[in-house]
Amino acid sequence: MAVDIEIFGQLLPEQPRRRTMEIEKPETARFVAHAIGLNPDEIGLITINGVQSDLDDPVQPDSRLCFFPYITGG
Amino acid sequence: MKILRVNMKEAGVRWEPVSAEYEQIGGRALIAKLLLNEIPPDCDALGPHNKLIFAPGLLGGAVVPAAGRLSVGAKSPLTKGIKEANAGGTGGDNLGKMGIKAIIVEGQGAPKKFYSLVVGDESAELVPADDILKTGTYATADKLQEKYGADSTVICIGQAGEQLMSGAGISSTGTKDQRSNHAARGGLGAVMGSKGLKALIIRKPAGKIKFMDEKLFRAASKTFAQELIKSPKLGTKGSQHLYGTAAIVGAVNEMGSLPTKNFSEGQFEPSVELRGEKLRELVLAREGKMGARCMPGCVIACRNLFVDESGKPVVGSVQYETIALVGSNLGLGKLDEVAEINYMCNDFGLDTIETGAALGVALEAGLAEFGDFKAIIGLLKQVGEGTVLGKVLGCGAAATGRVLGVRRVPVTLGQAMPGYDPRTLKGNGVTYATSPQGADHTAGNAFGARKQVNPLGKEGQTELSFKLQIIAAMLDSTGMCIFARPPIIADPQLMLDMINGIYGWGWTLEDYDRLSRDLLRTELEFNRRAGITQKDYRIPEYMREEPLPPQNAVFDVPDSELDSIFDTL
């Protein structure tokens, strides 16, 4: 089962914006971030299936996981 | 410091000293107090008893980075309550340097007789504006800067304001290519039109402000600028600088809060083409400009100059709210289309939020298909032409809904919602449903505010909005851009040192907090006396009953919580 991952903005600028990652059991967003080489300190917002989440929240196989840099609303 | 009072009935001007009551307040706070003291809150917003006020913030003239915004206020023809909208540009700092605390425009002259007000350090005069009538804001600014100097600030209305359309804003020139900075919200352009004031020209100031403790001010101002530069959100490596306000398009869409097709959905698949990342790619490939500034010395530099495929400038600057309201909300998925509508709105002098929402309602009524760019442009052109339909659209979403028989109208207090659907970002819903400013994200924007408050849940939203509304009130009284808030929230002493360095008031944090709360109390009291009840602030019924896909959320923060939000003010 794969997680659909998308990274935004200036995060990992040289890498593709969208990818999938196979996981066999629920993992944390932190685990996925680490696996793709993302520095947790640079992550400002995480969503799992569109829901604002934390680094240590579980990511189920078949989820959509997005990493955003620090952003702000006006 | 001084106040300039302009009587449009007599076409006369008068300088006044600043009374003790107004000495220690600026911007939005000063506007609130003046309006409550000087106008009947139940007056006709477009009648002779309303007053239009221009007021720099307390930091105006000190050239603090990102803190030269100009507040404009009056009773709103949209909300029927108090309204303050502030804009970047050069007006706030220039008025501050002249020692002008406020310009109060009052009375009303003969119908359709328009003037320009020309203000210098010690001079002010009204001159006929016949030669710039029925002219858009860009050409008006060009003509007036040719006459009064490229270093003057031109603040003006377009055709929408002249025709008293309640979706009209007020445009101000800024630095270089940032020609259009709008005090957009609440129909203040219509109030300016009702006064017979086409333009306000602020000539280049001769002097600078005097500091009571320049060392204290400089130290705080320097630290503040350094903190902005270091900020992961705002600094030169931050998303606000790299992608502008459009940096959040992807996130708002992902969270299901992006207004789509008249707020009927929270995600718009083609929004990938509307993201800040795409904006940056397009603009740089076409040799436009990213990292532009609306105010001199701003270190965030979130603006852009959007250019077309041939590199010709279209508009400075395409921003998030406009992308949301005239892009996804109208089913349009190309930044070129958004930029063209943006330019037209700016030129007619229209609030892009109000107009985007009005067009969304018109599309729901069947006047054109969502996504039909040409048809949408055709509708918008009618605003400038002043056709009956154009006047309806120019009067905003609520008026358009009433005329066209649409009940799904995204407004509170008569004013259109900005680019965050309240069903999936409930903190903003609380702000829309409680702020004396109506549906206005700048009054307390919960997007990305706190991880511990789930945007989809109803818990903790009123507490969050309450805190954000106090912070917004604090910033709006100083002329500071809301984006620049992180260093001040982290260390409020920086703001106090800057203010105390200028004025020598010896303010403490308690003083500052008290004045911010007093501002909100004043605005709420104005609205109460205007006859606005708590029910008038409510989120529309359909948003409380009809789930928004894909999160299938409704706005469900209980009325009892909304009604008691200011109990501890």
Image (spheres, rainbow, N blue to C red):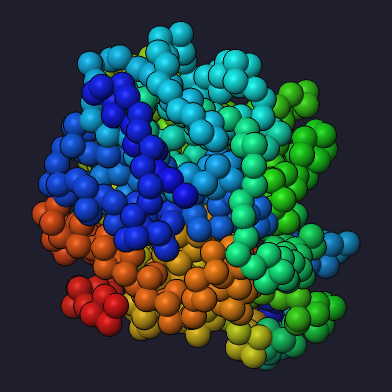
Q: In the rendered view, does A48 fall on the left or right side of B369?
A: right
Above or below residue B514? Residue B337 is: above
Could you tell me which residue is drawn at 16 percent across and 49 percent down? B41
Instruction: Give the side of residue B57 with respect to residue B215, left or right.
Output: left
Residue B432 vs residue B98: left or right?
A: left
Quadrant assignment, res B149: top right
Residue at 60%, 15% (x, y): give it.
B147
Can you tell which quarter of the image residue B552 is in? bottom left
Q: What is the total number of numbered labels drawn onto the structure image? A: 0
Q: Is residue B76 left or right of residue B214?
A: left
Q: Residue at x 45, y 74 (%)?
A: B512
Residue A44 percent across, percent down from the top left: 66, 74
Q: Could you tell me which quadrant the C terminus of chain B lies in?
A: bottom left
Residue depicted at x 55% and y 42%: B98
Residue B499 seen in render? yes
Q: Nearer the viewer, residue B340 or B256?
A: B340
Residue B175: x and y, percent? 68, 37
Against B182, residue B57 (above or below) is below
Task: Please name whichever residue, B143 or B215, is drawn nearer the observer in this view of the structure.
Answer: B215
Outermost right residue: A14
Residue at the farthest top position: B131
Examine the rendering and report whether any part of residue A10 can be seen: no
Residue B257: x %, y % from top left: 46, 61
Rendering coords of residue B370 (x, y %)? 43, 36
